[in-house]
Image (cartoon, rainbow, N blue to C red):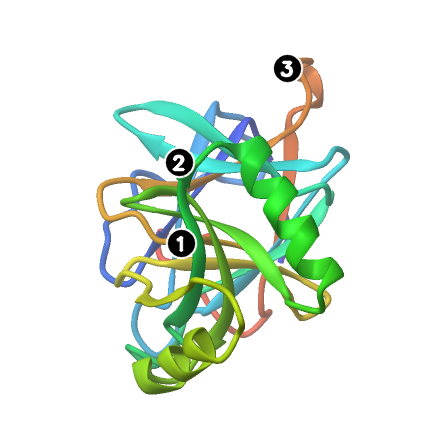
Amino acid sequence: MKKFLKLIFMLLIISVSVSFAVNANSVTDKISVGILYGSSAVSEINVKSGFNLILGEYRENEFFPVTNSNYSEIKLSVNKTEGADSCHVQYYSGITEAEAKEKVTQLKNMGINAYIAYSDSGICVWEGSYKNLNDAQYAAQTCGFSATAVMSGGNSVKASRSGEIIFVYSASNGKLGVKPDTDNKMDEKITLRGSSDKKYRGGM
């Protein structure tokens, strides 16, 4: 399943209403897509562009960028089971994007698969995706750094590349937004691809 969309892709999850659907011949400034809504809905979706994808937050009809994924194709997913893999180790919170990228690089050089996350605490640096809080707390206590265990919110969305988490959106008052890194409006196109036998909420 493929759709070519313009500008901003907002991912709405669980039972959040979809603003509108888009047909194959229409072009719009933004589109909302719901996943994991009922047994017939997809729990993940591939997003592709001709440019690297900017990940951020969409709230009050405005897009607020958080970080550049440095990839032109990523997978967005939510957990099929509530609470599953929703615990993480938090190393830093409330920092700038530049600081977060620097910390992620430092941790990766030490063998820690860290990534940028966005929560109600702002921009954070997290690691892991643990099945329960006890596992995350143990990892935090034994990592050799000052770290804490955190749980992502009910509307959290993971962005991954080749099976590795590169970003987690876990803020409670907005929605994950994805936008191509280009100033040329004519180039702001996104391809969405999901399972051929599943449906997107909203009829896509």
Q: Residue at x 64, y 67 (%)?
A: 112
Q: Which residue is drawn at 36% across and 79% down?
A: 137
Whether residue 200 is visible to the viewer of this picture, yes or no, is no
Q: Which of marks 1 and 2 is in front?
A: 2
The kind of secondary structure element at disc 2 is strand
Of the residues under marks 3 and 1, which one precedes in the sequence? 3
Residue 185, label in figure: 3
Q: Where is residue 93 in the image (x, y as percent from the top left)?
A: 39, 46
Q: Position of residue 185 (x, y in %)?
A: 63, 15
Residue of label 1: 203
Of the residues under marks 2 and 3, which one precedes in the sequence? 2
Of the residues under marks 1 and 2, which one precedes in the sequence? 2
Out of 129 and 145, give the one closest to the viewer: 145
Q: In this view, does 201 lie to the left or right of 191?
A: left
Callout 3: 10 Å neighbours few (<14), some, many (20+)?
Answer: few
Q: Where is residue 194 in the image (x, y as percent from the top left)?
A: 58, 63
Q: Which amino acid does label 3 sit on?
A: Lys
Q: Which residue is drawn at 32% across and 66% down?
A: 150
Out of 65 and 138, give the one closest to the viewer: 138
Q: Is residue 76 left or right of residue 93?
A: right
Q: What residue type is labelled 1?
A: Gly
Residue of label 2: 57
Report the Cα–Cα distance between label 3 and label 1.
26 Å
The kind of secondary structure element at disc 3 is helix
Figure quadrant of residue 148: bottom left
Viewport quadrant of the N terminus: bottom right
